[in-house]
Amino acid sequence: MALGLDARFDFSHTYWIVAGIAGGCPDRVSLASAVWARWVVDADLAYEIDGREIPADWPTGLLPLGKSTPYEQPMEARPGQTYALNAVLANWAFALTRNTALDDTEKIRQARAHFDGAAANRPPFVALGDEISSSTFWHGKLMDQWASDWMRYFTAGQGQFATTAMEDTGTLQSMEFLAAAHRVDLKRVLVLRAISNYDRQPRELTAAESLASQRVGAYAAYLPALESDYRVGHVVVAELLAHWDKYETATPGVS
């Protein structure tokens, strides 16, 4: 917000790439993969019942604010809870970067061999997928299922959960406020997250045992994920700079 409101700068034509590492759903992404988001959904705006007191017919103890049961209809997102990014721009960025070569290390190969999932055992790749943003570091296969359901609920089935990260709904809310002040163009915001770790346990561990091994800087793909962020994001930045005469006034894919 401080940068966006600084009168010394004109951000009216600026493109933004919000980049970082993330936990990944092994059904949809693999370690060190880079993922462009079309939806970012907040998970902290919620009611919660302790897991030991969840009614037997409830799939989760997390409830949308204002509701009395999980996923109660009609869905009513609160301000700052659901962000639909410019999907056309995200698709353009994905098409531009989908063939970017990403490093596959022996450490990553060993780590992913312990996971099951449609994408878990693939070498790192570039993908489209949506993000659950939460200040709670959650972990485990049941929480992974909740995240998938939470994403579907708040996007009316349009979003597909792939990554979990922390800051992005806060960053996007700042962007939203700056757009309302005519300081930035919200259609020019991209979110890129690279997978440093899986969001659930490998087949031979419990969720608690797996969580005990999750430490910032010690994730199985921490450094490769940072490298993937740079390589993939750099392709987009280089394209925008090389053809700024076109992109300054015309957002890719937007007429």
Image (tube, rainbow, N blue to C red):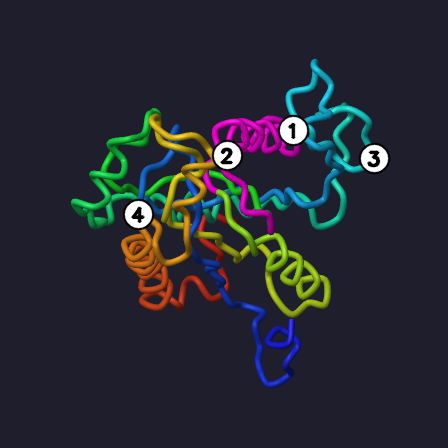
**Do tag 2 and tag 3 residues touch (Cβ < 8 Å)?**
no
**Do tag 2 and tag 4 residues touch (Cβ < 8 Å)?**
no
**Magenta segment range?**
135-163
Q: Mark 3 sits on what residue?
A: 66
Of 237 and 196, the residue lying toward us: 196
* Amino acid type at mark 2: Phe
Q: Is residue 43 magenta?
A: no
Residue at the spot x=30%, y=47% of the render?
Answer: 220
**Do tag 3 and tag 1 residues touch (Cβ < 8 Å)?**
no
Q: Mark 4 sits on what residue?
A: 220
Residue 16 horizontal/vertical position (percent): 49, 62
**Do tag 3 and tag 4 residues touch (Cβ < 8 Å)?**
no
- In space, the residues marked 2 and 1 are separated at their CA atoms by 11 Å
Of 156 and 245, the residue lying toward us: 156
* Amino acid type at mark 4: Ala
- Whichever of callouts 2 and 1 sits on the residue coming sooner in the sequence is 1
Q: Which mark is residue 88?
A: none
- Whichever of callouts 2 and 4 sits on the residue coming sooner in the sequence is 2
